[in-house]
Image (cartoon, rainbow, N blue to C red):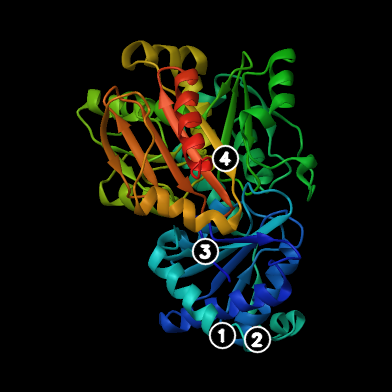
Amino acid sequence: MIRFGTGGWRAVIGDDFTAENIRLVAKGVATFIHESGKADLPVIIGHDRRFLSDTALKWITEVLVHEGIHVLYILRSVPTPLIMHTVKKKGYAFGLEITASHNPASYNGIKLIVEEGRDASVEVTKRLEEIIASIENEPVAYTGFEECVASGMAVHVDDPFNEYIDDILGLVDGNLIRSKNMRILFDPMHGSGVYPMLAIMYTNRVTLDMINGNRDTLFGGTMPAPSEDRLSELRRRVVEEGYSLGIALDGDGDRLGIIDRNGRYIDANETLCMLYYYLHEYKGYKGPVVRNIASTHMLDKIAESFGEKCIEVPVGFKYVSAALDENDAVLGGESSGGLTVRGHIFGKDSIYAASLFVEMICAIGMSATDFMAKLEERYGRFRMAESNLEYDPKDKGEIDDLIMVQRKIPNFGVSIARVSYEDGCKVYFENGDYIICRFSGTEPLLRIFAESSTVEKAKEYISIFSDFVFNRNN
């Protein structure tokens, strides 16, 4: 069965990500577009650098055109935020990106983007799943790609890059960046964020060197996720060769990892806190901040000190962007490495986030490590630990019953303030710590996050919860 999680439909190549299923999804999308009364508008399609992504773009185009929908396609690989930006900028109703984001190389997928460049809502993806289920036993008709192009119903476009890059350049202080002679080592992790990042940094006179910039569908034998454990080469070279920063993007350019000049990994929570403080206090962007339930509560403390609110939403950037829009928030983000800022797109964009981070370093006159230390002096220490635990899919119902139906939780030895079941199970402790346990929307994983004043205490919470779940029958 085809299911859309928080980041779209993702599946193992050759198992479920097949020509048959890709065309089935395309037929479902076409049917939904006609239902929505938006078939008169073109659909823009892009793809990342994964295996089969470029071919899948053609398969999708063949079905959409056969169903009477005009397609604009981009042949070179593009980051997901560029497609979101184009849908918003051009006033399109739909866009598609063929990507599995930061998943292992064996995966690929399809991400649906809707009006204003937003992630598709739960209501949209639920309806799409219903349509797909209703037609899954029917043959999917399509028109050959060359015929689609010859008919004028499928048109190659390349210009979205310029508007996307120019809009980001207009959002950052280029004069400030140009005055600081920054040297940055860039690791796109073999992904699709290469060209726009190069264009933005070179325009702002940043000396930018690059590693892992070639297309490699195996991503160097690792996952294209800019987490601390996957950036050892970037860290080593930043320190040894004296770079101002190291910047890493995930496979489709919507998640960010930072290495400070001293080799310290700056995690996503720290990035959110620094950028919110910078935007509010240095650039005068007044307003609340949005985070998902698995992101740092330091943002709450910072917002409170400004007389602002920190708005908590479920996991899934669609919820972050919706709350950002509804509350005119300054910034919205999540601990997995994605964020956006008011006035830009309603989706994760690590290329813009990286550009803003570079501006911030140029403006504050200190390293990211020192800046974070100052924030901790004022707001306290917040340390997060996380664990992704594989489970047998046949056990999912039993685990869900234990946590979400019976609503049982272990004894953590700490007073509990409240428990939320809005998205998984989140336990808020009286001392300000928390732990959350939820199912991944894209993989057979149980994701557990905990935050405390020390990593050791956060890991202790996770150990207690893990033992409770996986030894549930003992």
Q: Badges 4 and 2: C-beta atoms under 8 Å apart?
A: no
The nearer-to-camera label among 1 and 4 is 4
Residue of label 2:
140
Residue of label 3:
4
Is 54 rendered above or below residue 187? below
Q: Which mark is residue 158?
A: none
The nearer-to-camera label among 2 and 1 is 1
| Alpha carbon separation for disc pair 3 and 1 | 16 Å
The residue located at (45%, 46%) in the rendering is 438
Q: Secondary structure at mark 2?
A: loop
Under mark 2, the amino acid is Val
Residue 93 image offset from top left, x and y in percent: 45, 70
- For mark 3, does the 10 Å Cα neighbourhood hold few (<14), some (14 to 19), or many (20 or more) residues? many
Disc nearer the start of the sequence (4/2): 2
Nearer the observer, 410 or 276 = 410
- Is residue 169 visible in the rendered image? The answer is no
| Alpha carbon separation for disc pair 4 and 2 | 37 Å
| Alpha carbon separation for disc pair 3 and 4 | 20 Å
Q: Badges 1 and 4: C-beta atoms under 8 Å apart?
A: no
Under mark 1, the amino acid is Ile
The residue located at (64%, 34%) in the rendering is 248
Residue of label 1:
135
Under mark 3, the amino acid is Phe
The nearer-to-camera label among 3 and 4 is 4
Quarter of the image for residue 275 reads top left
Disc nearer the start of the sequence (3/4): 3
Is 53 rendered above or below residue 180? below
The nearer-to-camera label among 4 and 2 is 4
Residue of label 4:
388
